[in-house]
Every structure is written in structure tokens, then in C-alpha cells.
Image (spheres, coloured by chain):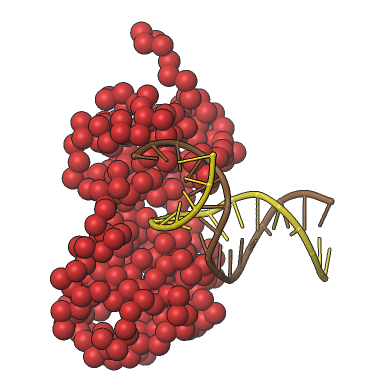
Chain colours: A red, B brown, C yellow
DNA sequence: CTAGGATCCTGTCAGC
DNA sequence: TGCTGACAGGATCCTA
């Protein structure tokens, strides 16, 4: 679920609540969700929260860290004692509003001033204890490519050309090619650049690659900038489903609605094994002949 | 090596 | 109502 903007929003939010707090006790409710010795981090203080792509790293005293990856359905929900404060981020579900722990709670971190819940419906996400000095050697973190803001157009173009026969959508979802995009922002960035997701990456021109990289930055920045209010809005929604995606998504989950550029109906198709949303008029599969 | 599909797991929803 | 299959905001492993 959470892609780069959501994870960054969670990082910023939790930094505001959890820094300098002590991890007093950890309850692991699902063994699969917690990797490593929990007693190593009990009693330590949270000194920093970093982000590597879609993974969060909590640095602790004692030269130890914990990496948390939310994968598809992970959530981090912080509740302060006496309801003084709360923060929720990740896969949007009613768990944001309910009494916790609930059925999907996998790990509970009891902190000095509140409680941090790691919820995860599908159990794909995890918490992993790693010595701080070894974080950047972790197999996941090690192979991450730069984020779109740290890449220039030509570099991005060359990265696409390394997989000339793969669908361009599959290539931009690969965190070793460019870091941060997931299913939502991949669709949104391709729509921005007017590129059909099933086109071979090798057919993307330098100009198109530049537009696609720009699209990735634009859609993710917009989401990060509205991210804080996003989470707050959801929690305040009081029973109604969070639909913050609709605030900025032009194609994602908008099948059947008109494209805001041309009015043509948005379609949902399948590309690279993933549900994929396009405007069939703006995003042509065949490249038009040069000279229009 | 590449590209595509299956897989981990639980819950929800559409269709019979 | 109950069953069945498809699908899901991710990443890895297996196969051809």
C-alpha cells in the first residue's frame, strides 16, 4: 500500500510524537511480523526516524535500529495516553478509528507516553531488528535506486533502456530502477506523461522519459504536501471511509469517469500483473508517427 | 541474463 | 444465505 509519499508522511508524523521516547515493552502478536531479538530494543530510546524508499528505519540508542516495511496493508498508529494525541498512517482502514489492539494488530510498542501499533491485514509487512551500522547493507535497502528527485532525465532514460522489452509500468515499479513509485503513482505518472503503461520501455523517447520523471515528481510531491492533512482528514472522517486518493488521483480507481483532459472514459486494464488505470485517448499504445 | 507469473496472507466484493 | 473466484497502494522467488 503505502508508497513513498505515505511513508514520508508517516515518518514526519511519528517524528513529531515519538522522538526521545523510550520503548518500554514490545508485544509480538504475530511471529512472522517481527524479525530479530525484541529484547535488544526494549529499554532503548528512539533517536531518529529515517526513510529508505518505502521502508522506515527507527534509530535507537544502543547502536541498534529497527526497519519497518508496511508492504501492501501495513499501518502505524500512535495513540497517546489519555487520548491527548493520535496519529495514523498507512493502508486506510477503519483500524485508524477503532479501539486498539484489534484483530490486525501484529506488534505493540509500549512507549513512555503512548503506544505505537503495527497493524497489517495481510502480514506482508514486517519489523526487523538490525544494528544501526548495518542498515545500509540490508538486502532491501542496498539495492534501492535513487528517488526521482535525485535522478536526471538522461540517467532515467538510460535506466529504462536497460529493460527494452519490459512494459514501462513494470520497469518504473522496480525499486532498483527508480525508488518510490508504487501502483498508484506509477499510473498517475504515466497519465501525466501521456504514456501507455504497456509500451516496451525501449520505445520510450528521451523526451518522454523526461516527462515521465517529471510526472513522478509532481504527483508524489503533491501527495506529500497534502499528506499531513490527508491522515488527519481520514481520522476526523468519523466512520466514513477515507477517500483521500480522490483529492489528487486523475486515473487511479476512476474507471468509468471522464478524463479531465479530454473527457474520454478512464479504463481499467491489466499490465504487469497489476490493475492499471489509463485514459485510452491520452495514452496511446502505438506511438504516433513522427510529424503527427 | 531477461521477463513474466506464482507466491506470501487476510478480507471484501461481485456473481451465481 | 452460502459458496466461489478475483482482486488488492509490495516485493521476492521460481521458471522458461
The quarter of the rendered structure image containing the N terminus of chain A is: bottom left
> Does residue A137 appear to the left or right of A187 in the view shown?
left
A247 and A255: which is toward the camera: A255
Q: Quadrant of residue A79?
A: bottom left
The quarter of the rendered structure image containing the C terminus of chain A is: top left
Total numbered labels: 0
User: Is residue A77 shown to the viewer in this render?
Assistant: no
Where residue A87 appears, as percent x and y from the top left, is: 35, 74
Where residue A105 appears, as percent x and y from the top left, is: 47, 79
At x 25% / y 74%, what residue is drawn? A130
Q: Quadrant of residue C9?
A: bottom left
At x 36% / y 80%, what residue is drawn? A116
Where residue A216 appears, as percent x and y from the top left, is: 31, 42
A150 and A128: which is toward the camera: A128
Q: Is residue C13 above or below residue A74?
A: above
Q: Quadrant of residue A162?
A: top left
At x 39% / y 71%, what residue is drawn? A126
Q: Is residue A17 above or below residue A231?
A: below
Q: Is residue A70 above or below residue B14?
A: below
> Does residue A221 appear to the left or right of A168 in the view shown?
left
User: Is residue A40 shown to the viewer in this render?
Assistant: yes
Q: Residue furthest top?
A: A291
Where residue A108 appears, as percent x and y from the top left, is: 39, 84
At x 44% / y 34%, what residue is drawn? A167
Amino acid at each position: 500500500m503505502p508508497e513513498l509519499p505515505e511513508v514520508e508522511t508517516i515518518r514526519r508524523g511519528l517524528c513529531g510524537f515519538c522522538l526521545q521516547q523510550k520503548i518500554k515493552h514490545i508485544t509480538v502478536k504475530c511471529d512472522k511480523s517481527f524479525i530479530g531479538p525484541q529484547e535488544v530494543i526494549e529499554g532503548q530510546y528512539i533517536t531518529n526516524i529515517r526513510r529508505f524508499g518505502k521502508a522506515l528505519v527507527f534509530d535507537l540508542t544502543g547502536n541498534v535500529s529497527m526497519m519497518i516495511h508496511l508492504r501492501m496493508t501495513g499501518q502505524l498508529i500512535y495513540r497517546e495516553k489519555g487520548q491527548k494525541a493520535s496519529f495514523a498512517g498507512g493502508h486506510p482502514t477503519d483500524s485508524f478509528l477503532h479501539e486498539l489492539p484489534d484483530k490486525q494488530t501484529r506488534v505493540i510498542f509500549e512507549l513512555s507516553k503512548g503506544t505505537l501499533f503495527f497493524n497489517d491485514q495481510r502480514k506482508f509487512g514486517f519489523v526487523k531488528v538490525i544494528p544501526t551500522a548495518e542498515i545500509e547493507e540490508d538486502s532491501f535497502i542496498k539495492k534501492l535506486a535513487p528517488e526521482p528527485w535525485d535522478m536526471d532525465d538522461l540517467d532515467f532514460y538510460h535506466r529504462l533502456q536497460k529493460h527494452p522489452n519490459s512494459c514501462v509500468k513494470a520497469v518504473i515499479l522496480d525499486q532498483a530502477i527508480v525508488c518510490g513509485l508504487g501502483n498508484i503513482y506509477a499510473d498517475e505518472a504515466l497519465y501525466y506523461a501521456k504514456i501507455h503503461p504497456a509500451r516496451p520501455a525501449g520505445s520510450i523517447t528521451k523526451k518522454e522519459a523526461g516527462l515521465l520523471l517529471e510526472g513522478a515528481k509532481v504527483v508524489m510531491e503533491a501527495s506529500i504536501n497534502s499528506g499531513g492533512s490527508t491522515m488527519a482528514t481520514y481520522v476526523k472522517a468519523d466512520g466514513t471511509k477515507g477517500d483521500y486518493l480522490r483529492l489528487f488521483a486523475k486515473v487511479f480507481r476512476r474507471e468509468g469517469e471522464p478524463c479531465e483532459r479530454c473527457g474520454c472514459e478512464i479504463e481499467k486494464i491489466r499490465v504487469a500483473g497489476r490493475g492499471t488505470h489509463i485514459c485510452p485517448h491520452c495514452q496511446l499504445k502505438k506511438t504516433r508517427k513522427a510529424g503527427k
